[in-house]
Image (spheres, grey):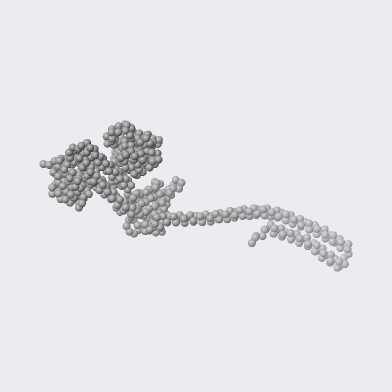
Amino acid sequence: MSKKILLVEDEAPQSHLLSEKLKTEGFNVLLAKNGEEGLALALSEHPDLILADIIMPRKDGISMLEELRKDKWGKTAKVIMLTNLSNKEAELLEHDVVDFLVKSDHTVDEIINTVIEKVSE
Amino acid sequence: MEPQPKGIYTKIFFGHVLAMLMLVPILLFYVFGVESAQRGISPPSFLSVTLIYIVTSSAIFYSISRYISEAIEKHSKTLATKLSEETKRNEELELARTTMTELVDDLQKKSILGEKEQSKNEAILSSIGDGLIATDQDGNILFMNTIAEDLLGYSSHEMIGKPVVEAVTVKKEDGKDIPVYERPTVKALATGERIKTSIAHCFYYQPKKGEMFPVSITVTPYVLGKKIVGSVIVFRNIVQEKEIDQAKTEFVSLASHQLRTPLTNINWYVEMILSGDTGKLTKLQKEYTEQIYESNQHMNDLVNALLNVSRIELGTFSVELSDVDLPKLSKSVISELTAKIKEKKLKLKTHFEKEVPIMQADSNLLRIVFQNLTSNAVKYTPEKGSVDISVTMKPLGKKKAKKNHVYITFKDTGYGIPKKEQSKIFSKLFRADNAKSMDVEGNGLGLYIVKSIVENSGGTIYFESEENKGTTFFIALPLDGMKPKEGTRKLK
């Protein structure tokens, strides 16, 4: 059975491209446009990995992560934060994310490869 | 009233005595003569009596006058000596009096000047816009100006004489007191060095009433001979600067995010096209798409460089120490530029001394230094030129070797920096005319960032350059120069 990836991203072009690429790699992709939708989907679907942006409307990625960590399942869920803010690393380490990627520093392939690597760890 | 000179007075007194003694026999003789005539005494008897009287009185008179003369002479000599001594003493007294008068005049003049100087200094100290406190060598308050009084809410009378560490409460942003040994005044008095706090890591003063406020503090110890005799604390409320600083940081952070988002979209989609995911491209389509990709990369680099500049200027970049192997770091940077080096057929030589130790530094920051100087050498050297990079324990330039320093040199046979523009080369956004005209990509921020990093690490950087012959950058870095610093952001 293919692994389930939850992609939480408000930027449509990026969400579209990443989900297409992930699907090509054989993942089952769930999409959310903000932290609120992301948290609800995560808690109901228990994906194998969450790939989440930080700056999003309604609920940002860090608030979503904080609430996720309060949940029994969410406490140990694998999360990769994906953002163009380069100053959140220290804050994110406190929430035990498996990786933190600055979008503009990485190609799409690099991001997909990180997902493949981390989901099977 | 003038005092009666004693010597003269004595002389006159003895002169009168002598005259009286001479007058007495004449008077007696006259009385005796008149008496004899009246009694009818005969002239011979009168003459003999007279003669006996004259001889007797002359003898008596002679003895008396001689005795008196000798006494007068002796006394006169004593008087003369005393008079001479007296005159000398008077002269000395006069000299002393004149000297004293001059001294008093002088002191009066100096005192007026001193008072003028003091009131001038007080006026200056009181009128400067910053709070000012002066302390003695033990940190006891000697003076505070009115701005300091206003800012702290205490009057000079309440503060003078008290130790500044007790009289002024200094806190951290979280409201906790700063330990005494971390207080700028204590540090300045202990080390003799000027201590200055930065906006990014400022302290807070707690006034008598009201809330604590952020301050910029500069403490300058003052030295007499070789001894520290006190300190001058100058401080100002920087609450507005902090607010602006915060707004600027947030703006930069947000702007960088907003700028990077469309750049990321372009980047990723162009990558997909170039990788053939959307079908095969013609040669021309590929060439044009590559052009879009490269330009987008430059834009991304520019955003990153601008972010770095703002972090340097705000002092908010972090320094995280780890083991750094400079030759390894240099090789890694060179490998990223291999394609460009090959394309331009450049001869690249490296000289890494085995003695170069692993140093404690921030590898990200040193990578920025190596990236900028290596890529500059590659960019600004024409085809078939050469680039030499060395990491050694002795300087290759003209400067003398310093203890515990590592020397990094980037030498190229490139276009060089025109002489008239050499002084501006480390300025922000500056690009030399020849670099601009050659259509070489650059944003004028690299060397500014490099210099800031090197100097923040306690190092020095300089260069030698000749147009159309080449440029050499020399860096001296102390092996233990970088100090860990908590910042909000990393430089990338």
> Image point 71% across, 60% down: which residue?
B13
Q: The N terminus of chain A lies in which quarter of the figure? A: top left
Residue B285 position by quadrant: top left
Where is residue B145? Give x, y as percent: 41, 56
Residue B427 position by quadrant: top left
Count all numbered tags in the image, as a single digit: 0
Drawn side of residue B375 relative to residue A23, left or right: right
Where is residue B266? Give x, y as percent: 23, 43
Where is residue B107? Give x, y as percent: 53, 55
> Image point 67% across, 58% down: which residue?
B5
Near-viewer residue (B24 or B345): B345
Near-viewer residue (B12 or B160): B160
> Image point 40% across, 36% down: which residue?
B399
Q: The C terminus of chain A lies in which quarter of the figure? A: top left
Look at the image and tell me whether residue B431 can be seen.
yes
Where is residue A97? Give x, y as percent: 20, 45
Looking at the image, the residue that sits furthest to the bottom is B38
Look at the image and tell me whether residue A118 can be seen.
no
> Image point 33% across, 35% down: which residue?
B381
From what the image shows, is residue B15 above or below residue A6?
Answer: below
